[in-house]
Image (tube, rainbow, N blue to C red):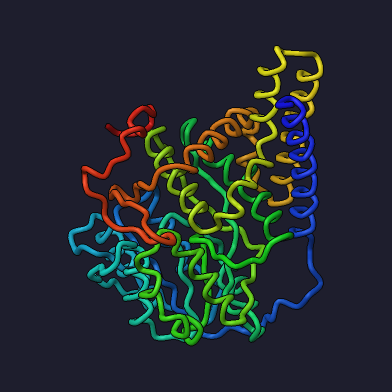
Amino acid sequence: MLQTLLLVFIICSWLFWLVALYLVHSFFQPTTKPRAPGFTPPVSILKPIKGVDVQAYENFASFFRQDYPHFEVIFGVADRADPVVPIVERLKRENPSCPIRLLVIEPFGANRKASLLHGLAAAAHHEVLVASDSDMRVTPDYLRRIVAPLADERVGLVTCPYQGDLALNFTARLEALHMGATFLPMMLAGRGFLDMRFAMGATAALRRSDLESIGGFAAIADYLADDYQLGARIAALGRRVHLSDYVVTSILGATTFHEQWQREIRWARCNRVSRPLEYPGLLLSFSTPLSVSWLIFSDFSIVAWQAMFISLSVRWAVAWLATSCSQDWNTRRWLIWLPIRDMLSSLVWLVGFFGSRVTWRGEEFVLVDHGRMQPAKPAAINAWLGFWPFTRR
């Protein structure tokens, strides 16, 4: 019975990835629809920052090189002594023609990023706001492409996918594989069958008036999944969440297993609390782990080996073609490690089902009701997590 059930799930997972590939291909096809090239309202770019990310100067500088008529960039930190402050001050000196401000904002919610965004939005001069994570890098056409959909009054928020670059060690390459070969196809598959009611931290472009209608960033300052909450609340206004075909780049650098484990567990628990009915469905994306399970339970039968071969072939083929569609050439170089990435993803998914503790930028939090979070007390640690090699004891 178990082997039959595994076989059914494995076949369904093959179909899932083939459908995902079709949706990726369709999404990145050149469009004949106008991009509203004349729609270039003034924009305020909001950058909440903490600490110095890999190549932070180059990441920030890419937002000043926009082929866009009028925009400002506002950085927000919680501490004037943050080591990232001198980098922003240098950028201000080197870009005198671009309005750049650095604000020190007192956090008031458990989600420090949302707290900073609230202060940045209040200080912004323009109606169109673009929030972006600190480790993102963009090209000069970024603003034109993500702001253009807002010409349609029915669109309330524009977000975009992301891919990893400058992965300097093995764990960072596994993270890049997740972004380009797993998360992107899965996201487009979800978008194809479910409502697009969430944003991504890579980019969220919206009007100030719509933001104020949902209570501003202050309304989501205690939630772990601030990007999901932002998209869901904008959609609740009757506005559309638009997924741009512009792909931003996340600069990864070198990471450790401990860092990656904490980050991915946070993502998993974020997904679980945000979309609890859909989280179990991620099982359909685990072609390789399901095939390994069947191989073990079938005592390594010939049929199970054949299923394993098909699963690996499907995953590699879909990842190869998906990275071609998205022009993610860096991730393609590391596809040999995709089976390991898939096994790690399934482990993260399984652990994400349990527990409520997450680590974010060195701070510990505990999830409470409906995805809210609060600072964790040392005694609140889930003791069983200490058994995992990636978890600090």
Q: How many marks?
A: 0
Q: Quadrant of the C terminus?
A: top left
The one nearer the camera, 99 or 175, is: 175
Q: In x, y percent, where is residue 83?
A: 24, 54
The residue depicted at 80 percent of the width and 21 percent of the height is: 306
Q: In x, y percent, where is residue 364?
A: 29, 49
Compared across the picture, whether 310 is left or right of 340 comes to right
The one nearer the camera, 79 or 264, is: 264
Q: Quadrant of the N terminus?
A: top right
Judge whether 85 appears above or below 210 on screen.
above
Q: In x, y percent, where is residue 4?
A: 77, 28
Judge whether 324 appears above or below 242 on screen.
above
Q: In x, y percent, where is residue 297?
A: 67, 18
Q: Quadrant of residue 150?
A: bottom right
Judge whether 254 appears above or below 266 on screen.
above
Q: Quadrant of residue 287?
A: top right
Specify the farthest residue to the left: 81
The one nearer the camera, 159 or 44, is: 159
The residue depicted at 40 percent of the width and 59 percent of the height is: 224
The residue depicted at 59 percent of the width and 55 percent of the height is: 277
Specify the farthest residue to the front: 1
Judge whether 75 appears above or below 303 on screen.
below
